Amino acid sequence: MACNHTHAANSYPALNSSAGPKWIKNLTKDRLGTFNGGHYNDVNLGSVLFTHRLDGPESVKLKVWSATGLTKPTFEEAMQQKFRTAKKGDSFGPSCTNHWWKVTVTIPTYWEQYERVQFEFDPGCEAMIYSVDGTPLQGITGGYGGDRRVEYIIPPEARAEGTHEFVIESSCNGMFGVPWNGDTIQPPDMNRFFSLASADLVVPNMPAWGLLWDFQTLRELVDTLPGNTPLQNKALSVANEIMNVFTKGDLSSIDRARKLAEEVFGEGWEEKGASIYDEGAEKSNIWGIGRCHIDTAWLWPYRVTQQKVARSWATQVDLMERYPEHRFSCSSAQQYKWLENLYPPLFEKVKDKILDGRFQPVGGSWVENDSNMPSGEALVRQFLFGQRYFETRFGKRCDTAWLPDSFGLTGAYPQLIRGAGMKYFFTQKLSWNNINVFPHSTFNWVGIDGTQVLCHMTPVDTYTAQASVGDVNKGLTNHKNLESSDAALLVFGNGDGGGGPLAKMLENLRRIRAVTNTHRELPPVSMGHSVDEFFETIEEDTKAGSTLPNWHGELYLEFHRGTYTSHGSIKKGNRHSEILLRDVEQITTLASLLKHTRKSYIYPKAKIDESWEKVLLNQFHDVLPGSSIGMVYDDAEVLYGEIKKDGEALLEEAFSVLFPNSVPLTSSTRSKSLAGSSRIVAYNTTFFPRWDIIKVPLAKAGSALKAQILQASDDGKEGYAIMHCPAAGPGELKHPSNALHAHLKPVSVYTNGSDHFVLRNASVQLTISKGRISSLVDVKLNRELIPEGQTGGLIIFQDRPNYWDAWDVEVHHLETAEPLAFTNVSVVSQGPLRAAVRAEVRYGQSTISVTISLDATTATVKDNSRSLFNFDAVVDWHQRHEFLKFELPLNIHSDNATYETQFGYVQRPTHKNTTWDIAKFEVCGHKYADLSEFGYGVAILSESKYGFSCQGNNLRISLLRSATAPDAEQDQGEHHFSWAVMPHEGHFLESDVPIAGYLYNSPLRVRCLPSGAPDVVPSLKQPFSVEGARNVFLETVKRGEYDSFDAVANLDDKGSSTTVVLRLYEAFGGHAQAKLVISSHIPVLKAFTTNLLEDEDEDLYVLRPTEESDTSGTVLSLSFRGFEVKTVKLVLGTLPSNPSHKKVSKRSSWVTVDQAQLLSL
């Protein structure tokens, strides 16, 4: 049978005489780098990116005014100044100065034919473009880095008019400050000048720019995808052909080249615009969200950040108008408040975008704070102030907590995040670990109390992604638990110094999506959604997290461990400010409930909030850690000074209500206040009874006061007396008596006159021999606590991290230990109340003076509590790259040491079994670090230090570092700080260490009652107490967040709300059933548990006192799980008449007044 084949006209030829199109792939890849810029910029694509460029005075008129010094005038202030003529090429500066430009451009009529006209302004630094009425329009980033944005699109209406006027503010700092030698973290060069590189009116060739973005995406595909995939080879082939097709002199070649790109992106992809995301895969692996990480301070001070916020956010509002899919998330209520106060028109624009869902607040906190060192209550306030701001300004709280750049995360956070109304958490800093790789991307983070949050650490490993093909691909290829979740958040946009997403990033993502609509070698990326939607999808896909892995406890960052110690004065300012505001809130709350006969007192809520905002601001994750430039710390120290001044003034005002006519007892108290029958009293702001030794100036002290002095200083100017205070109440000096002496443990000091000193009482004994602590003895047990042949004391290490100077201390520093010996030891106090020796250490250019003292009181009132040894240091510090610590080798064996963390403690290894154990060679603790075994332990207490370590049996506290970058003078100068050594019988869990740490950090508020002042002490009793659970601590007493503070509290006014809020927590990690007892003179109508935002949760049964009851106060029963934080809201008001409730013993009242003297809030 015949076979008939029909052949096409262009059939496969029989003969072939060509060489063939075979390529050398690596050379073709290398060729792609020559298509734009570089050596061939005169003939490649870079040569046709602009059609026209004008910079002459007939087209561009510039006038400039330079602000004085480092001042930052407002737009209105600047416009009132006298401007001078300026031109392109002018130099301006120095660093951190601000310059204002008035710009007038004249646009040629024939330019109306072009798609776009731009003004290109490149000052080499940051700038902001304003309309002539002062509305910020967009930011400018000069220079030629990847964050460059120098174009301002002239509005169409201005092009039609032919002229356009606008204003520019330029600031002489780069996106990352002005480092003196180009290395980002180096100290700033404060004498840098900048040149105006361009001030040009230009017509961009938009098809050429489109081709540039096409080509960039193709090249990223080539560089990212494996070499054996069809898409990678196709992208390379098309990119190569584009280079063949393009000809500089033939603009039509651009259109042909772009048509070639459609072979990869899909035909007609560009016309689809944002709807490109509606095609392709129904479910996307990668969720794109625009982000602009602006460090609230770092290599620039707060005032520069305020400008960065306005520039960056104005840019994003502008981009949203051109890219409907663009969604932008931003945290930090402080930055929103700055915008609201300093740039009101822009704030309104941002608010509009928030309300339509495109500009998305996240985080719920005041700033992106450090989470290692702030107290638990401070972390609560970060959320309380943040969420309150977002709710009052935008009508919505945040659902997702957001700390991408904080240097490790406390295990207390999951509970606090949930308590602040959020259940999702985003972070990524642990990708910086320098020893171990964190094993999860999406997981349930379970805190120390068992509370969980849904956590995502983006596998893209950055919060400043450039929206590249590599970023998108990494979101899947680097995902560590694809078995349970295959979604990743792509957080893109220039950051740290601000800027945010650029148009080229949004263009790139559209092209990447177009590629994935027809190819499967890349994961699809979606846009137009929120961070909250991302987490909601994960929650649903993982069956409410049940298929996700869990991580228990802290998220310890194996990096930046030196930040627990850098800039010691800032650590001290933070701790002391937190304690001060705790006391202020408690005392002012009590004062606000009392109507004094001479004046009315209103709870100073606004002033307290103002101080809290300053504390929270300084807790930003580059400020409190000590990793910012010196200018930042100049500002921070000012804020701490204001907090101290204002806080002490608030206390003084409140004490004038509680202790009329009293004055604070200080070394400078006027002698007449101590004369005659004056009395010394103190208020204990902790909820633990205590015995303290206080100093009293003896000059012109009355005989009655002198009779209470049990020890005088050698010069006779000061005396020592015993103060006993009940929990949360006033105390008085104790008169000498046999009963008092039986309670005390008189101290003494012995010396051989040269190099051997012994401090001792019936509880403990410490020996200094040949300049080192050679012995620490528990006298009651006759137990030596320092191993034979070992000594304790100060020790110094070389401190030369591999790069991040102020941030890091590396494990190899431990190999360079040099013990320091005390010299010139002398006895400065003989006892019997306080014995002390003073010692010196001279090392290098530094001088260290340490006073070591032992008191006749014990650390707490707990049975068998031991006395503690206090170390008061005055250091004149001038070392560089050296690390000062105090160490104590102990005759105690344990695999773990215990460190206080927020609302609890964390245990960390003392051994090096694994690399995870080794990594924790320097850790963060708060008021104590403890090494215990069965039956015994020793703690180091701290009043302002956060760095600790325990290697084997050697417990250490970190005292001072001396980095030189980014602050060249970090920690140089004089320091005053203290620590204490506290032996204790029993394991840590049986001990009083947490209470001792609390007391050590809580100074008594000592007052002098002059002769004739009313005796209010017997009537002032503790307002609140916790009974039945020694492991439950009452942390905070404050007025309710949503009360009215316009007038004196009036409990009889049923139309007003009067509330008191108490915060308690379980401190030892176990369950508890506690009774919260409220003084009967605080009339509780109702009580609730609430979340941290004070939203009412559960009604509490209020048990009021009766004649038959065994308590004279109102009682609330509370149950706790280990480390649980519980917030209780008391609603106050006049109680209904009830005969069974009329008689209440006034002995139990915290203040003897009748009901009419108590007023509602």
Image (spheres, grey):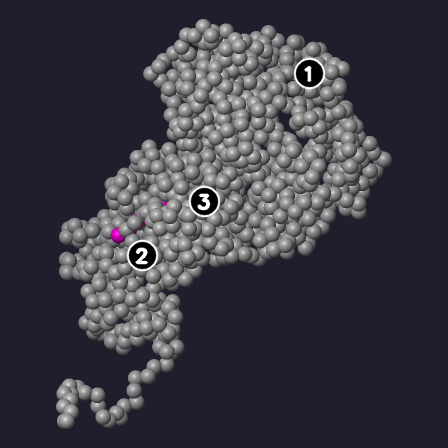
Q: Are marks 3 and 1 in contact (CB under 8 Å)?
A: no
Residue 632 or 414: which is nearer the viewer? Answer: 414
Label 2 to label 3: alpha-carbon separation: 36 Å
* Amino acid beneath label 2: Ser
| Residue at the extreme front | 1
* Residue at the spot 38% in from the left edge and 67% down from the top edge: 224
Label 2 to label 1: alpha-carbon separation: 73 Å
Whether residue 307 appears in magenta in the rendering, the answer is: no
* Residue at the spot 20% in from the left edge and 54% down from the top edge: 106
Q: Position of residue 134 (x, y in %)?
A: 27, 41
Of mark 3 and mark 1, the one earlier in the sequence is 3
Q: Position of residue 268 (x, y in %)?
A: 19, 65
* Amino acid beneath label 3: Ala
Q: Which residue is mark 2?
A: 284
Judge whether 167 appears above or below 76 on screen: below
Q: Which mark is residue 734?
A: 1
Q: Position of residue 350 (x, y in %)?
A: 29, 42
* Element assignment for label 3: loop
Magenta-tinted stretch = 325-331
* Residue at the spot 45% in from the left edge and 44% down from the top edge: 297
Of mark 2 and mark 3, the one earlier in the sequence is 2
